[in-house]
Image (spheres, helix red, strand yellow):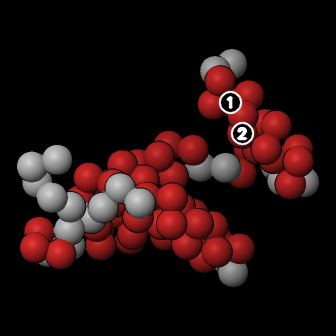
């Protein structure tokens, strides 16, 4: 197990969730896309929004793909500073 696996298992136990239902690669990919294409602080906020959507019944993989696509299409002038 990795530290990520250990963390997800412990966090899920704390929140009474099933770790098998946590799409870690999709969440990390979404966070990377938002941090690099939009702005860094948007990454954890987007992960939270993904969680809200999933809590309301959205498919986790589909919602992550949709948000990543939104980040990819985000206008550069509104997004992250390309020099940072």
Per the rendering, the mark at residue 73 is none
Judge by depth and name the residue closer to the eye, 19 or 78. Answer: 78
What residue is at 47 percent from the left and 46 percent from the top?
Answer: 28
Label 1 crowd bin: few (<14), some (14–19), many (20+), radius 10 Å? few
Quarter assignment of residue 37: bottom left
In the rendered image, residue 55, in percent from the top left (x then y), is placed at: 71, 73
Residue under numbered circle 1? 5
Residue under numbered circle 2? 8
Circle 1/circle 2 CB separation < 8 Å:
yes
Quarter assignment of residue 78: bottom left
Residue 9 horizontal side relative to residue 66, left or right: right
What residue is at 65 percent from the left and 24 percent from the top?
Answer: 3
* Residue projecting furthest to the bottom: 56
Residue 9 horizontal side relative to residue 43, left or right: right
Residue 52 horizontal side relative to residue 44, left or right: right
Residue 61 in sight in this render: no
In the rendered image, residue 32, in percent from the top left (x then y), is placed at: 36, 49
Report helix, strand or loop for mark 2. helix
Label 2 crowd bin: few (<14), some (14–19), many (20+), radius 10 Å? some
What residue is at 88 percent from the left and 48 percent from the top?
Answer: 14
Q: Quadrant of the N terminus?
A: top right
Residue 16 in sight in this render: yes
Report helix, strand or loop for mark 1. helix
Judge by depth and name the residue closer to the eye, 77 or 6. Answer: 77
């Amino acid at each position: 197990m990795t530290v990520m696996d250990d963390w997800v298992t412990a966090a899920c136990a704390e929140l009474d969730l099933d770790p098998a239902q946590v799409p870690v690669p999709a969440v990390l990919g979404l966070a990377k896309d938002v941090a690099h294409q939009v702005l860094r602080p948007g990454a954890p906020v987007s992960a939270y929004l993904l969680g809200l959507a999933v809590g309301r019944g959205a498919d986790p993989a589909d919602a992550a793909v949709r948000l990543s696509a939104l980040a990819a299409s985000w206008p550069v002038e509104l997004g992250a500073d390309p020099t940072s």
